[in-house]
Image (spheres, rainbow, N blue to C red):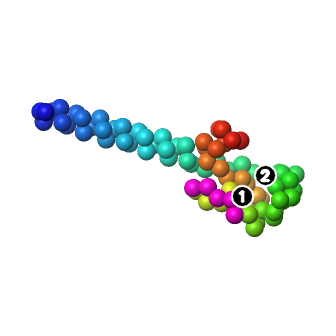
């Protein structure tokens, strides 16, 4: 195999690996949606939100920010599992 061909194969391999890494990062990035008071009451029927241990790769699913509750899920979870 010539040097030029090896260099092209290496460049293609690196581009493929980088593309896959970018795709995985995009699918895993969190989307946080504020919860209404009715949603908080519904979710708290099972357990209080501050004691829940539901987690995804980025952290807890239920997060309190600035006094309001948010549900944070990965982009792919929002697309397929609402």
Mark 1 and mark 2 in contact? Answer it, CB < 8 Å.
yes
Residue pointed to by mark 2: 35
Magenta residues, start to end = 53-57
Q: Is mark 1 on a helix, strand or loop?
A: strand
Residue closest to the eye, 20 or 67 = 20
- Toward which corner of the image does residue 57 lie, by quadrant? bottom right
Mark 2 crowdedness (10 Å alpha carbons): few <14, some 14-19, many ≥20: some
Question: Could you say where residue 62 lies in the image, as x and y percent from the top left?
Answer: 71, 58
Residue found 27% across the figure and 37% down from its top: 11
- Toward which corner of the image does residue 5 lie, by quadrant? top left
Judge from the rendering whether residue 57 lies leftward or rightward of residue 19; answer left or right: right
Judge from the rendering whether residue 77 lies leftward or rightward of residue 13; answer left or right: right
* In the depicted structure, whether residue 69 falls above or below residue 17: below
* In the depicted structure, whether residue 31 falls above or below residue 16: below
- Toward which corner of the image does residue 60 lie, by quadrant? bottom right
Does the rendering let one see residue 65?
Answer: no
Question: Could you say where residue 17 lies in the image, as x and y percent from the top left?
Answer: 37, 42
Question: Could you say where residue 76 lies in the image, as x and y percent from the top left?
Answer: 60, 42
Q: Is mark 2 on a helix, strand or loop?
A: loop
Residue situated furthest bottom in the rendering: 51
């Amino acid at each position: 195999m010539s040097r030029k061909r090896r260099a092209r194969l290496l460049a293609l391999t690196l581009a493929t690996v980088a593309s896959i890494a970018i795709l995985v990062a995009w699918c895993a990035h969190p989307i946080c949606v504020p919860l209404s008071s009715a949603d908080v009451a519904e979710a708290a029927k099972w357990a209080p939100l501050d004691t829940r241990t539901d987690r995804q790769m980025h952290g807890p699913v239920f997060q309190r920010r600035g006094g309001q509750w948010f549900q944070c899920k990965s982009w792919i979870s929002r697309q397929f599992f609402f």
